[in-house]
Image (cartoon, helix red, strand yellow):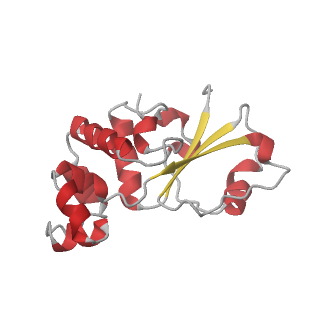
């Protein structure tokens, strides 16, 4: 039996692949064996999550890490289940494509462009598949490069109280 139960809920495939890379390299504050259902989840609704996972008995509180780019999206858990979870939101705003812009050393040029990160990657960097798992896996094949980009991304975050992916690195 595991000492902890972690629900890692990823907004999209790119975020999920980044978590997968970090898990495979044992660089996160939780391990793959800690994951609820043994994988990252795509369950965005609190109600859906509680119906699927909280109706069963768990020996410990379920740690929920929601990885998303929206600060407004709410994850509502009914009062009957709230004691079973500890929810932490990990914000990837503006977008996960910022990691690519940072790795390419194009942050200053991007800021002057007035484009969204996804538009900059597609139009200026000519990287059309930046959200696809295969692209992320190949592009960040060196986990140390990925972690360095996460560190820079964290340092650029205006809200120091927000968790970022770098806060999940051990």
Which residue sits furthest front? 112
Q: Which of 19 and 160 is in front in this view?
A: 160
Q: In which quarter of the image is the C terminus?
A: top left
Asked whether residue 20 is in view, the answer is no
Name the residue: 34% across, 37% down.
24
**Left/right of residue 80 with respect to residue 85 in the rendered view:** right
From what the image shows, is residue 93 above or below residue 162?
below
Q: Which of 71 and 132 is in front in this view?
A: 71
- Residue 87 coordinates in the image, percent (x, y): 64, 45
**Left/right of residue 56 with respect to residue 116 in the rendered view:** right
Name the residue: 72% across, 58% down.
76
**Left/right of residue 42 with respect to residue 94 in the rendered view:** right
- Residue 136 coordinates in the image, percent (x, y): 26, 55
Name the residue: 26% across, 38% down.
148
Q: Nearer the viewer, residue 18 or 102?
A: 102
- Residue 53 coordinates in the image, percent (x, y): 69, 50
Marker count (numbered): 0
Q: Quadrant of the N terminus?
A: top right
């Amino acid at each position: 039996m595991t000492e902890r139960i972690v629900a890692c809920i990823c907004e999209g495939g790119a975020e999920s692949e980044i978590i997968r890379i970090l898990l495979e390299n044992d660089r996160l504050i939780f391990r793959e064996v800690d994951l609820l259902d043994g994988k990252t989840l795509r369950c965005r609704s609190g109600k859906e999550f509680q119906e699927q996972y909280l109706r069963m008995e768990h020996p410990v509180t379920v740690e929920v890490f929601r990885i998303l780019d929206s600060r407004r999206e709410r994850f509502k858990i009914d009062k009957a289940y709230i004691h079973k979870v500890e929810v932490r939101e990990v914000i990837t705003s503006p977008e996960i494509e910022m990691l690519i812009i940072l790795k390419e050393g194009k942050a200053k040029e991007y800021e002057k462009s007035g484009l969204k990160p996804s538009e900059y990657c597609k139009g200026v960097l000519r990287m059309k598949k930046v959200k696809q798992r295969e692209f992320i896996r190949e592009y960040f094949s060196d986990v140390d490069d990925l972690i360095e980009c996460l560190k820079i991304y964290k340092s650029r975050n205006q809200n120091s109280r927000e968790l970022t992916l770098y806060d999940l690195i051990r």
